[in-house]
Image (cartoon, coloured by chain):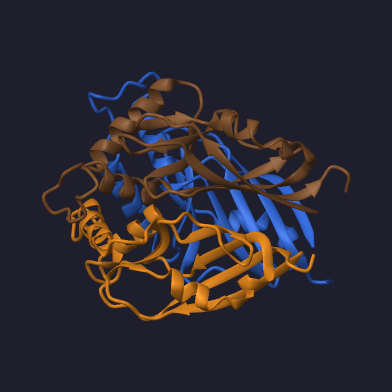
Chain colours: A blue, B orange, C brown
Amino acid sequence: MQWQQKEISLKARPRGFHLVTHEIVQQLPELAQFELGLLHLWIQHTSASLSINENADPDVRLDFESFFNRLVPESEPYYRHNDEGPDDLPAHFKSSLLGCELTIPIRQGGLKMGTWQGIYLGEHRNQAGSRQIVATLQGQTKSE
Amino acid sequence: MQWQQKEISLKARPRGFHLVTHEIVQQLPELAQFELGLLHLWIQHTSASLSINENADPDVRLDFESFFNRLVPESEPYYRHNDEGPDDLPAHFKSSLLGCELTIPIRQGGLKMGTWQGIYLGEHRNQAGSRQIVATLQGQTKSE
Amino acid sequence: MQWQQKEISLKARPRGFHLVTHEIVQQLPELAQFELGLLHLWIQHTSASLSINENADPDVRLDFESFFNRLVPESEPYYRHNDEGPDDLPAHFKSSLLGCELTIPIRQGGLKMGTWQGIYLGEHRNQAGSRQIVATLQGQTKSE
């Protein structure tokens, strides 16, 4: 039985949805030690999101950005919290709609996602820096 | 302390929201061993979802289907990813809005949900086969 | 390695979004025992939600209430489940959109959230009583 917890960074990206599975796994060589377990990812921000979706056609990520911009419009006259730019409050709504965390099964040293599943970073601000993630790994190690 | 991980299947269902608590629990007799713990469910698809809602009135599931069809319309002119049918891209959006995973408390060999809570499978494709779920159980067993 | 599971209550609140980080942490003195781990929170209701967002400007919570009321309108003519009041069915939709659970990293006896992150209770009914949460803590204790 083992626990590991570390902070990792995702490089700064433009507003939109980005496939970050590889960038995350690359920073978690500890995964290889686990026979079976769970990886928990927590993004420490309220204007970005983590979700799971199709890892193949890049058009899906473009369509995500278009769809969520229509679902969560900017500059509505009833918005009160406007002092950080028109993209700020919608970024908060998107973050809560899509979520700031994932728990992914681990099997035989890797992530047991479906064939077409990948991890999406939703970058909901026009200008943002790198994004911090707390990664917690737990489970049975291969030597157990 | 114990870990178990297994893959289970949900039978093919028509598009819509379906109460699947019983079908899932039935495939997890291992639950009975746990005094206290967590069950993690992960659906390995990007066009279906797992969520929690009312387990009593079947009209609620019908209303879910109607509401989410209006929230996420088909065949919008700005959609790019259109080659898998008009229900495909909306299914991806619904999957990320509702989520592909649940973590449910275990207590005394059963799920510690509220009285009115049940597990909803959101089947967002017009035609889909059975759906695969990775179930991970962890916690303290009754003999500990 | 340690597991703890307990039920806590959030006091009754008016409809809207409420910052409840302090009320939750206050009821979990067990957190102090953990060097590293995860806290899982599960609200046992289908008309309230738990999510993470900005903990500073109270206007953000007011904007959440306004935005989600527009995203999920009441009394649509196509709604079938109407017998528990016009706020009931929208409360179910909001609960599934925002989610009924959180898993938060624990580090050195506290929650390892970002500086601006707080726990939001979404109270989606016009009249509701206190809300019950199952809290599950697991991880490595400081003495290990």
Image quadrant assignment for residue A56:
bottom left
Image quadrant assignment for residue B15:
bottom left
Farthest residue in the right direction? C143
- In the rendered structure, the answer to whether residue C72 lies left or right of residue A100 reads left
- Count of labels shown? 0
- What x and y, as percent, mark residue A132? 61, 40
C110 in relation to A34, above or below? above
Nearer the observer, B130 or B119? B119
A86 in relation to B82, above or below? above
Quarter of the figure that contains the N terminus of chain C: bottom right
Farthest residue in the left direction? C77
- What x and y, as percent, mark residue B33? 68, 71
Q: Is residue A15 visible?
A: no
- What x and y, as percent, mark residue A20? 54, 54
Nearer the observer, C130 or A72? C130
Q: Is residue C23 visible?
A: yes
Nearer the observer, A132 or B57? B57
- In the rendered structure, the answer to whether residue A3 lies left or right of residue C49 reads right
Image quadrant assignment for residue C7:
top right
Q: Residue at x 75, y 59 (%)?
A: A30
Nearer the observer, C117 or C81? C81
Q: Residue at x 59, y 34 (%)?
A: C24
Farthest residue in the top direction? A83
- What x and y, as percent, mark residue B142? 73, 67
Q: Residue at x 35, y 80 (%)?
A: B12
